């Protein structure tokens, strides 16, 4: 079973096992960490209005994300430096994901070859950035398509890397092997200024990505409903509500706060996902109630990977699934698509569901 205590114990055990600069890198947020520190509490503030007299003799948390059937809405978000958490890095993460019947998004900076990740049998998507020279993206994208990536996740909230106030002492880059990063890029990538992250992203880039890969495109890093609608109008298959774990612009709103308006703006035109501060099965139910179809986890799987490799990842995802099924049963919903409307509109001062 999972809960705040389980999540906290995972992080504490990971902190004991990891070199201090690596743990610091995993948990740090941008600048004063205001956004990073508010994420969990934003989910905790939400309250349910459960249904009664509903048939919950058979409850299933299974869902489908862009054609991939998974056991529950919980899936693994892209994170870098997974080989600093465990020697087998993304491959161990993928094995745990496969065992739990989940899905993972692989960072473009991954330290494991796409082919090795694919060999685990886990369904996976590629997270990518668009470069100043669009053609510089192509070798990475082509390699991912060849290895069987099922979707492309475009991160749009990182035209530059947000400032972190690092502690004194060595940084993560000084204590880790350079070979744990970017192994799927061609030799020499990153040396040319044209390989930097593009600061001129626009709707046209979504159409370009679909054309060159033939894959569904997910836009990650959306907090505003007007931006979400622009993404859908430009052809996005899914919109991912994310503030990058509080690691980009500090003082931005929590994803739990932003999710309902984005869902309303998107309607049925695309799938909507969320990440940021999700720690428990109850948080997962709250995300479903607010309209998310997929609930992605970033730091928590990293800690599970650190503590017990693929088995730690499997246990984390299976525990969240178990707790979500119990919460759904108690809330009177037999499937994820019945959860919308369970959240009390606390900010209105009464019990209208949203």
Image (cartoon, rainbow, N blue to C red):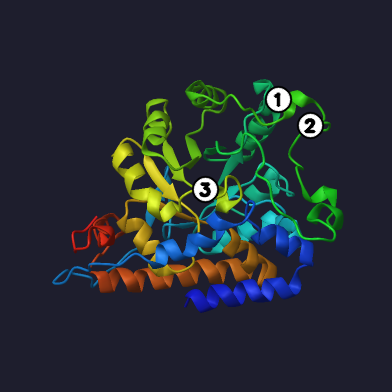
Q: Which residue is mark 1?
A: 136
Residue 198 quadrant: top right
The reply, left or right, for residue 226 in relation to residue 214 is: left
Q: Which residue is mark 3?
A: 243
Question: Residue 328: x and y, percent?
Answer: 30, 68
- Residue at 26% x, 70% y: name it: 331
Residue 104 appears in the figure:
yes
Is 216 located above or below residue 46 in the figure?
above
- Residue at 82% x, 52% y: name it: 173
| Image disc number at residue 119 | none
Q: For numbered disc 2, what is the local secondary structure?
A: loop
Classify mark 1: residues with Cα within 10 Å, few (<14), some (14-19) or many (20+): some
Closest to the camera, between mark 1 and mark 3, is: 3
Classify mark 3: residues with Cα within 10 Å, few (<14), some (14-19) or many (20+): many
Classify mark 2: residues with Cα within 10 Å, few (<14), some (14-19) or many (20+): some
Question: Residue 152: x and y, percent?
Answer: 54, 37
Is 26 located above or below residue 163 in the figure?
below
- In this view, the residue in front, 189 or 175, is 175
The reply, left or right, for residue 14 in relation to residue 268 is: right
Whether the residues at callouts 2 and 1 have beta carbons within 8 Å, the answer is yes
The reply, left or right, for residue 246 in relation to residue 231 is: right
Q: Earlier in the sequence, mark 2 or mark 1?
A: 1
Residue 343 appears in the figure:
no
Q: Which residue is mark 2?
A: 189
């Amino acid at each position: 079973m999972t809960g705040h205590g389980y999540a906290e114990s995972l992080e504490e055990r990971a902190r004991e096992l990891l070199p201090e600069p690596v743990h610091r890198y995993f948990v740090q947020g941008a600048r004063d960490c205001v956004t990073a520190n508010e994420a969990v509490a934003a989910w905790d503030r939400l309250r349910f209005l459960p249904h009664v007299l509903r048939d919950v003799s058979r409850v299933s948390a299974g869902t489908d994300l862009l054609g991939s059937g998974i056991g529950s809405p919980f899936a693994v978000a892209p994170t870098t430096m997974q080989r600093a958490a465990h020697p087998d890095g993304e491959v161990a993460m993928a094995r745990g994901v496969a065992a739990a019947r989940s899905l993972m998004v692989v960072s473009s900076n991954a330290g494991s070859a796409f082919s090795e990740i694919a060999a685990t049998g886990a369904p996976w998507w590629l997270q990518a950035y668009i470069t100043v020279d669009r053609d510089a993206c192509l070798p990475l994208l082509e390699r991912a398509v060849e290895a069987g990536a099922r979707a492309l996740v475009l991160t749009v909230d990182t035209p530059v890397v947000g400032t972190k106030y690092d502690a004194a002492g060595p940084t993560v880059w000084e204590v880790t092997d350079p070979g744990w990063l970017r192994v799927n890029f061609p030799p020499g990538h990153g040396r040319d200024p044209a390989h930097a992250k593009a600061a001129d992203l626009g709707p046209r880039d979504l159409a370009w990505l679909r054309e060159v890969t033939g894959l569904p495109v997910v836009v990650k890093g959306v907090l505003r409903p007007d931006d979400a609608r622009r993404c859908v109008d430009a052809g996005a298959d899914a919109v991912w509500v994310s503030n990058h774990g509080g690691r980009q612009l500090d003082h931005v709103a929590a994803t739990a706060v932003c999710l309902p308006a984005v869902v309303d703006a998107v309607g049925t035109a695309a799938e909507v996902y969320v990440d940021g501060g999700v720690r428990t099965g109850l948080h997962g139910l709250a995300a479903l109630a607010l309209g998310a179809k997929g609930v992605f986890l970033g730091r928590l799987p990293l800690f599970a990977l650190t503590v017990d490799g693929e088995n730690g990842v499997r246990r984390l995802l299976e525990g969240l699934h178990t707790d979500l099924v119990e919460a759904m049963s108690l809330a009177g919903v037999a499937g994820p698509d019945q959860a919308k409307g369970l959240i009390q509109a606390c900010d209105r001062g009464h019990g209208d569901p949203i």
